[in-house]
Image: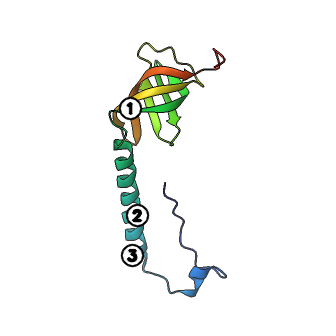
Amino acid sequence: MLFRSPYSARNPALAGLYENLPEEVMKSRKKSLLLMAEESARKYREKFLGSGIEVVAEKEENGLFSGTSGNYLKTVFRGCGVAAHIGDIVFVAVEGFEGNQVRGRAEKILWTKRRGN
């Protein structure tokens, strides 16, 4: 995860002690940093391809669920015969990617409040 904040030249911020960089340099550095962060995130997501992750089902629309894994991967998945519900923790087999999201299929329900597990 990347946290980037804009430059602040105000006093008493330490940055106020230095000369300003040209605007083009700041924009170029920001762009490079964001590209590196996107590449790093893509490589991280790819490590899970062909394996499975645990996902909390947060939304459902027309049989397609979306949720977040324990390691903060945004995930979309199909139920595939698994009767998942919002709030369930689902084991999802990772099949690919859609933009910055993991795409997969539900393999089994790991926890549901409906059964009281």
| Residue 3, position as x, y percentages in the image | 52, 60
Q: How far apart are marks 2 and 3 (CA)?
A: 12 Å
Residue displayed at 38% across by 43% down: 45
Q: Which amino acid does label 3 sit on?
A: Val
| Residue 60, position as x, y percentages in the image | 52, 23
Return the residue nearer the eye: 17 or 109: 109
Q: Which of marks 3 and 1 is nearer the N terminus?
A: 3
The residue tagged 1 is 103
Residue found at the very far front of the displayed protein = 117
The residue tagged 3 is 25
Residue displayed at 37% across by 69% down: 28
Q: In this rendering, which labeled residue sits more in front, label 3 or label 1?
A: 1
Residue neighbourhood size for the residue with mark 2, other residues' Cα within 10 Å, grouped as few (<14), some (14–19), many (≥20) = some
Q: Which of marks 1 and 2 is nearer the N terminus?
A: 2
Tags 1 and 2 in contact by the CB under 8 Å rule? no
| Residue 110, position as x, y percentages in the image | 53, 23
Is the C terminus in the top left, top right, bottom left or bottom right quadrant? top right
Return the residue nearer the eye: 25 or 34: 34
Q: What residue type is labelled 1?
A: Arg
Return the residue nearer the eye: 45 or 108: 108
The residue tagged 2 is 33
Q: Earlier in the sequence, mark 2 or mark 3?
A: 3
Q: Which amino acid does label 2 sit on?
A: Leu
Residue displayed at 65% across by 20% down: 113
Question: With respect to residue 113, does 55 lie above or below?
Answer: below
